[in-house]
């Protein structure tokens, strides 16, 4: 966001933050002639309707849901198969054109902007669910299949894919960014739920990271290339298939809400619930500012204090025990009585405050933009970082309600800012850097689930150190020696 604006010394006019570049941005100098020549080659692979140079389409593919400036590609292609992706990549490779994979555009760190122009690979036409193996609990999907799309496909099978970042993102995009969300405390992030990937490399060759068609639940065969591509954010190749783990839909789900006198007591409860081995599926933290926003937005009346939203998944029989252990723990920590919900409708109503948090935050300052930060620390450090962050927000007069996946030590400030106020933009920029550094100082990471993208490259270097960066650059140079894959991101 704000980071790259500063590095590039673009004057902070309001339009730079949130509005697309002019629709008729000339092709960048280097590619001017090349692009026109390759378009007809692209058309011969993907047909006329599979290639677009229209400004509206290009702009739509030049930005995600972050406040990073829109950077449209020169061309957008819509391949229908891995063979087409490979053929198009070969053309790009030959002409040294940058390639940027695009799923649903729901990222939050500016990962899809075409910094150096080039070709956006929009993968939404590849939307088939393939090779569902019910008894093995796995499935293979093409990159256009979204999380909700897969779950509705699975509806009658008794299985589901639980990783839920909120947005209805594409599953291959979620793999590319190592996404997670509210269910990760029970089911893990994308990192543990991808078994195999099919990837088109920069030169158009097709790699199967775990070997073609392989899907064992474990292996100790060689380096883990699948893991290398999870979180690579399009900088190593274009993911064209993902084989994913599935889970049985739990027999029973129960939701609860509980408020606490302090951040410390909410986090202490979380740690003790996990220590007790309660297989909690979601445990979400909302701070007093967030609760207040939710109350106002949804006309609710939750106590305006740190609050946990919980969800239990299990068999009907085991559920009672899970819930009573949890209730005992929260009561010992000064928590309120639980608000309960078992049937789907009441659970939905109970969780509504959490689900609408983004819009509730926006409603605090109508007409402003929201920007979600993302850091993650060892869970024992959560109370300290949240308390210090709240003090920082107040000191700098920044509106930033906090919502966190507290079971993972991961939390977000949903910052609501006026992008036309340069002073505020600068204050938010400094705040987010301080927040990330605070997380690093507490042995944490500058991003739990949004990725590095454009704005956090300097922080990545601080996080892993120069040697690890060098190793990453070496891997990148091996797989993409011409630096064509989503250049300017991550490293
Ligand atoms: C390799 O990485 C993938 C993706 O992160 C993960 O799901 C898998 O369990 C790993 N395999 C092994 C043997 O560690
Ligand atoms: C908000 O809730 C109160 C009672 O809880 C009710 O009297 C009032 O009409 C509600 N307002 C709106 C706008 O729904
Ligand atoms: C804090 O920011 C708001 C706008 O978000 C502004 O109206 C208010 O005057 C500011 N307060 C101080 C003390 O700067």
Image (tube, rainbow, N blue to C red):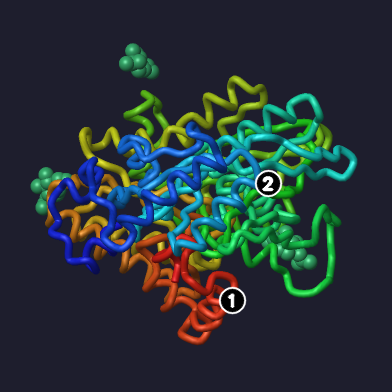
Residue shown at 33%/44% (left/top)? 289
Quarter of the image holding residue 345? top right
Per the image, label 2 sits on a secondary structure element best described as strand
Query: In this rendering, would 21 be left or right of 243?
Result: left
Quarter of the image holding residue 453? bottom left
Q: Quadrant of the N terminus?
A: bottom left
Q: Earlier in the sequence, mark 1 or mark 2?
A: 2
Q: Which of 434 and 312 lies nearest the eye of the viewer?
A: 434
Q: Tell me, yes or no, if residue 268 can be seen here.
A: no
Name the residue beneath numbered marker 1. Answer: 478
Q: Which of 479 and 38 lies nearest the eye of the viewer?
A: 38
Query: In this rendering, would 400 be left or right of 489?
Result: left
Q: Is residue 87 above or below residue 309?
A: below
Name the residue beneath numbered marker 2. Answer: 280
Could you say where residue 468 lies in the image, as x and y percent from the top left?
A: 53, 82
Q: Is residue 172 above or below residue 473?
A: above
Local crowd size for mark 2, using a 10 Å CA cut-off: few (<14), some (14–19), many (≥20) = many
Quarter of the image holding residue 246? top right
Check residue 346 in the rendering and tell me which mark sits there, or answer none: none
Could you say where residue 201 lies in the image, as x and y percent from the top left?
A: 60, 62
Could you say where residue 44 lies in the image, as x and y percent from the top left?
A: 54, 41
Q: Which of 96 and 159 lies nearest the eye of the viewer?
A: 96
Q: CA distance from mark 1 to mark 2?
A: 42 Å
């Amino acid at each position: 966001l704000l980071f790259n604006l500063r590095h590039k010394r673009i004057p902070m006019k309001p339009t730079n933050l949130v509005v697309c570049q002019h629709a008729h941005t000339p092709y960048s100098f280097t590619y001017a002639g090349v692009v026109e020549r390759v378009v007809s080659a692209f058309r011969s692979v993907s047909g006329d309707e599979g290639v677009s140079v229209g400004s509206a389409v290009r702009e739509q593919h030049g930005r995600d849901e972050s406040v990073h400036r829109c950077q449209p590609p020169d061309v957008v292609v819509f391949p229908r198969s891995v063979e087409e992706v490979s053929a198009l990549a070969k053309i790009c490779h030959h002409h040294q054109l940058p390639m940027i994979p695009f799923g649903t555009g729901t990222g939050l760190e500016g990962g899809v902007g075409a910094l150096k122009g080039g070709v956006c690979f929009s993968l939404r036409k590849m939307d088939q669910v393939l090779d569902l193996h019910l008894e093995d609990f796995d499935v293979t999907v093409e990159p256009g299949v979204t999380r909700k799309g897969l779950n509705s496909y699975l509806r009658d099978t008794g299985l589901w894919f639980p990783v839920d970042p909120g947005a209805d993102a594409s599953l291959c995009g979620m793999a590319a960014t190592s996404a997670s969300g509210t269910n990760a405390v029970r089911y893990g992030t994308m990192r543990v739920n991808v078994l195999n990937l099919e990837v088109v490399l920069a030169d158009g060759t097709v790699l199967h990271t775990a070997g073609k068609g392989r899907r064992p639940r474990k292996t100790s065969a060689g380096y883990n290339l699948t893991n290398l591509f999870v979180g690579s954010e399009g900088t190593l190749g274009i993911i064209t298939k993902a084989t994913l783990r599935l889970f049985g839909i739990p027999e029973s789900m129960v939701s609860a809400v509980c408020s606490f006198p302090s951040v410390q007591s909410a986090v202490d409860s979380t740690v003790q619930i996990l220590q007790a081995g309660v297989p909690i599926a979601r445990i979400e933290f909302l701070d007093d500012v967030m609760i207040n926003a939710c109350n106002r937005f949804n006309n609710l009346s939750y106590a305006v204090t740190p609050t946990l939203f919980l969800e239990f998944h299990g068999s009907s029989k085991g559920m009672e025990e899970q819930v009573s252990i949890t209730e005992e723990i929260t009561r010992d920590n000064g928590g309120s009585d639980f608000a309960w919900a078992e049937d789907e409708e009441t659970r939905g109503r109970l969780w509504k405050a959490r689900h609408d948090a983004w819009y509730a935050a926006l409603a605090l300052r109508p007409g402003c933009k929201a920007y979600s930060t993302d850091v993650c620390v060892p869970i024992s450090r959560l109370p300290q970082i949240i308390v210090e962050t709240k003090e920082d927000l107040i000191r700098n007069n920044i509106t930033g309600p906090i919502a966190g996946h507290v079971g993972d030590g991961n939390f977000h400030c949903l910052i609501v800012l006026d992008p036309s106020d340069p002073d505020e933009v600068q204050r938010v920029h400094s705040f987010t850097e301080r927040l990330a550094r605070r997380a690093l100082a507490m042995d944490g990471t500058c991003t739990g689930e949004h990725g590095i993208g454009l704005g956090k490259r300097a922080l990545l270097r601080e996080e892993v150190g120069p040697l690890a960066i060098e190793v990453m650059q070496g891997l990148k140079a091996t797989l993409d020696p011409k630096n064509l894959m989503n250049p300017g991101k991550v490293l």
